[in-house]
């Protein structure tokens, strides 16, 4: 909490990319995104829109420090990422929660409770059982309590997302990165998730007493339009930031889907 | 032909280099982070020791009886027919203590634990779980590799010791069953006399190195490089082949030491 507030007061960007080239995850000789310049400030809720293969996962992985840019400067919580080593790098990662796409990359050999408790236990030097109070609160808030002792195999996508979200939140991150959230969700799950993310960004979940900075990258923008406060589009290997509504005409390059029309309407 | 031979040699040295680097990183992490997050990591080490050591005890006992019957019982029975039962201890130490015991225990652990380690880690790698660990600030070498390597080294050592003790007893059981004129105290005196002080040291070192070899190679094959799910079985085959080769080399080094 204190870190988030300190950043907010000092207006240090949570993450910043300056002329960054980002390689493709599968083939690192090819750049997925070029010359990305982007600043994420404390309390922002960014919605990044892009088709499948536009470089959304690469962008989020780069911000999280999992993928190294091929050019440019990258900063995380005011510190240059390529200079971060050892404990400082771990500290940066602890402040950044990431929920991965599709399967949420849960640990299949651990129960749901253990999946969520693991990062807290690792960084706090406690046993899995000692993490019960903290884990229990997340399980309750995210409606995962009845599933706590199951392994995450064969669970619906929405449930896996909630587990991944709980695992990311247990370290009380300042920045939350969501890769294609709500993809394949039913209407009720979308409503729940949208509401939860909105409350998270306003600090109203009861879990944290600070406003979390959120970056959600998605190919289906409709569920996120109302939650987001800032928008960007990934197209032709570039990131087009739409902070200024005047720049909205840039959106005309994007396919004219009904979902995107909804986004346009909302922004306007 | 020379080209392919050259490529093979280069690949071999690349592999040695990569495995060596992975082993050094693992050793470095073990020394610097053994007590980090110990309330999470130490129970994990105990869990792996249970899996690779305690759970293999029944099959180790079975193998000890089989070796006792096939090798020790038969050998001593044959020796006594030509009046050479005084060499029973020497044969026991040379065949079972120095060679067969450590190799059988190593192959058992490799087959049961080494292969499952590659599959488990390879699947985790293919499913992106390792990246998720990194995203959470968890050192995958510290959390996944170190506990396995430590437990495998201890398991191979401990299982070898149990295997040898049980083999000696079961061997005598079969000698007794075949009515060979060899008193138990004579049999154990011969073994004690044939043992050199450095046999204990070499047994300890050899089994620990075998265990470390299984641990490092299985973890390297499962974890060190990006894998797709369909490549996990090939990685498992590679791990088995490399571990057997490494153990043969380690064994050869100790044999040379004993001969010289």
Image (cartoon, coloured by chain):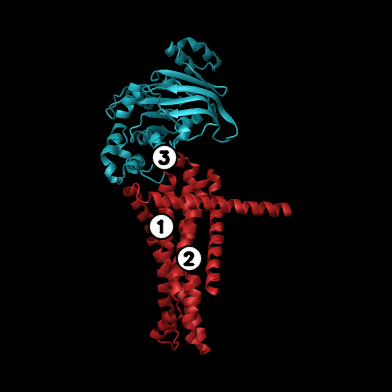
Q: Which chain is red?
A: B
Q: Nearer the viewer, mark 1 or mark 3?
A: 1
> Is residue A180 in view?
no
Where's residue B109, x and y in %? 46, 61
The chain letter for the residue carrying disc 2 is B
User: Against A118, is A227 above or below?
Assistant: above
Query: Mark 1 and mark 3: span between their CA atoms?
Result: 25 Å
User: Is residue B3 left or right of A142 when viewed as pictured?
Assistant: right
Residue with the mark numbered 1: B151
Say yes or no: labels 1 and 2 on the same chain.
yes
Q: Residue furthest right?
A: B1
Query: Mark 1 and mark 2: span between their CA atoms?
Result: 15 Å
The chain letter for the residue carrying disc 3 is A
Q: Secondary structure at mark 1?
A: helix
How many residues crowd around disc 2 within 10 Å: few (fewer than 14), some, or many (20 or more)?
many
Where's residue A228, x and y in %? 40, 20
Colour in which chain A is drawn: cyan
Residue with the mark numbered 3: A106
Residue with the mark numbered 2: B206
Nearer to the camera, A32 or A78? A78
């Amino acid at each position: 909490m204190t870190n988030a507030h300190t950043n907010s007061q000092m207006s240090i960007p949570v993450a910043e990319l300056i002329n960054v080239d980002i390689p493709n995850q599968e083939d690192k000789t090819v750049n997925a995104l070029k010359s990305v310049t982007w600043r994420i400030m404390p309390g922002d809720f960014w919605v990044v829109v892009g088709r499948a293969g536009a470089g959304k996962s690469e962008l989020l992985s780069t911000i999280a420090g999992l993928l190294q840019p091929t050019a440019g400067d990258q900063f995380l919580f005011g510190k240059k990422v390529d200079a971060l080593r050892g404990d400082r790098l771990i500290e940066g990662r602890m402040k950044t929660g990431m929920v991965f796409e599709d399967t949420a990359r849960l640990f299949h050999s651990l129960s749901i409770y253990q999946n969520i408790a693991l990062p807290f236990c690792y960084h706090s030097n406690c046993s899995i059982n000692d993490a019960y109070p903290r884990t229990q609160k997340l399980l309750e808030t995210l409606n995962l309590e009845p599933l706590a002792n199951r392994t995450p195999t064969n669970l619906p996508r929405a449930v896996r997302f909630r587990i991944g979200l709980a695992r990311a939140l247990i370290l009380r991150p300042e920045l939350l990165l969501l890769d294609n959230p709500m993809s394949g969700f039913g209407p009720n799950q979308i409503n729940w998730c949208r509401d939860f993310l909105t409350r998270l960004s306003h600090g109203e979940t009861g879990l944290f007493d600070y406003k979390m900075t959120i970056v959600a990258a998605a190919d289906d923008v409709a569920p996120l339009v109302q939650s987001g406060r800032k928008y960007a589009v990934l197209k032709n290997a570039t990131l087009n930031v739409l902070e200024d509504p005047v720049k909205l005409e840039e959106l005309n390059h994007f396919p004219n889907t009904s979902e995107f029309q909804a986004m346009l309407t909302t922004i306007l | 032909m020379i080209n392919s031979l050259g490529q093979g040699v280069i690949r071999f040295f690349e592999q040695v280099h990569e495995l060596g680097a992975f082993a050094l990183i693992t050793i470095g992490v073990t020394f610097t982070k053994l007590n980090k997050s110990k309330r999470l990591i130490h129970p994990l080490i105990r869990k792996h020791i249970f899996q690779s050591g305690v759970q293999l005890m029944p099959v180790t006992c079975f193998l000890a009886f089989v070796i006792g019957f096939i090798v020790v019982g038969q050998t001593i029975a044959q020796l006594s027919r030509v009046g050479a039962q005084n060499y029973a201890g020497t044969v026991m130490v040379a065949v079972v203590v120095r060679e067969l015991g450590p190799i059988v225990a190593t192959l058992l652990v490799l087959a049961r634990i080494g292969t499952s380690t590659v599959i488990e880690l390879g699947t985790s790698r293919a499913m992106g779980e390792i990246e998720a660990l990194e995203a959470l600030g968890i050192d995958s070498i510290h959390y996944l590799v170190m506990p396995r390597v430590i437990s495998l080294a201890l398991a191979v050592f401990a299982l070898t010791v149990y295997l040898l003790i049980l083999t000696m007893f079961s061997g005598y059981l079969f000698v007794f069953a075949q009515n060979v004129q060899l008193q138990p105290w004579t049999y154990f005196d011969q073994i004690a006399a044939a043992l050199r002080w450095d046999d204990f040291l070499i047994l300890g070192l050899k089994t620990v190195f075998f265990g470390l070899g299984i641990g490092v190679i299985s973890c390297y094959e499962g974890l060190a490089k990006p894998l797709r799910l369909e490549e996990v079985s090939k990685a498992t085959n590679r791990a088995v082949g490399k571990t057997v080769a490494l153990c043969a080399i380690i064994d050869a080094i100790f044999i040379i030491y004993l001969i010289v």
